[in-house]
Image: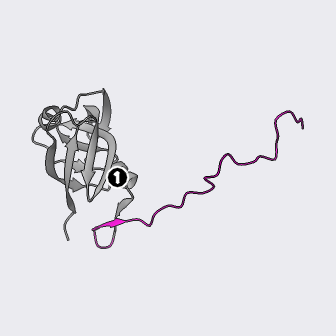
Amino acid sequence: MGYPHVAVEVSNLTRSKPSYVASFLVDSGAVVCLAPQKELRSAGIEPEGREAYELADGTPVEYDYGFARLSFMGSETVTKIIFGPDSVEPLLGVTALESVGIGVDPVTQTLKRYAPLPLKDLKGPRSSPLQLGTHC
């Protein structure tokens, strides 16, 4: 049983340049996404900062990161993405997956959509037992 891959379209937030499309490895152990820096820059995604990360083998590294619009499996999200080495296999992390209601089934290693989350009490602010102007 192999790890799932998914076709992902990566674009800058304004879609002002051609997007980058690739098969991303779904990595349930990775929090954020990672893609080759050359491809991200070509898509008009700019570094916003630099952070320390830990590789799967425990090695500490520092990479630039930016923000990108990702489209996959009929859904779209905006997420943090790491500017990896040009030879890196693109990774789709759990933050992007969960933001659109998708998770990895641990038994079948396939991607599954979660049931929609109910939105509660959309009528306005909840009443509080403490009213303004009252004292305890």
The residue lying toward the viewer, choosing from 41 and 16, is: 16
Residue 19 lies in quadrant: top left
What's drawn in magenta, residue-wise? 107-136
Disc 1 designates what residue?
A: 94
Residue at the outermost front position: 123
Residue 76 located left or right of residue 87: right
Residue 10 spot, x, y in % from top left: 21, 44
- Residue 115 highlighted magenta (yes or no): yes
In which quadrant is the C terminus drawn?
top right
Q: Considering the numbered disc 1 on the image, is that residue within a helix, a strand or a loop?
A: helix
Question: Number of marks in the image?
Answer: 1
Residue 83 lies in quadrant: top left
Image point (27%, 55%), residue name: 27
Residue 117 spot, x, y in % from top left: 49, 61
Residue 131 spot, x, y in % from top left: 82, 40
Say which amino acid is labelled 1. Answer: Val
In which quadrant is the N terminus drawn?
bottom left
33 lies above or below 5: above
Crowding around mark 1 (Cα neighbors within 10 Å: few <14, some 14 to 19, many 20+) is some
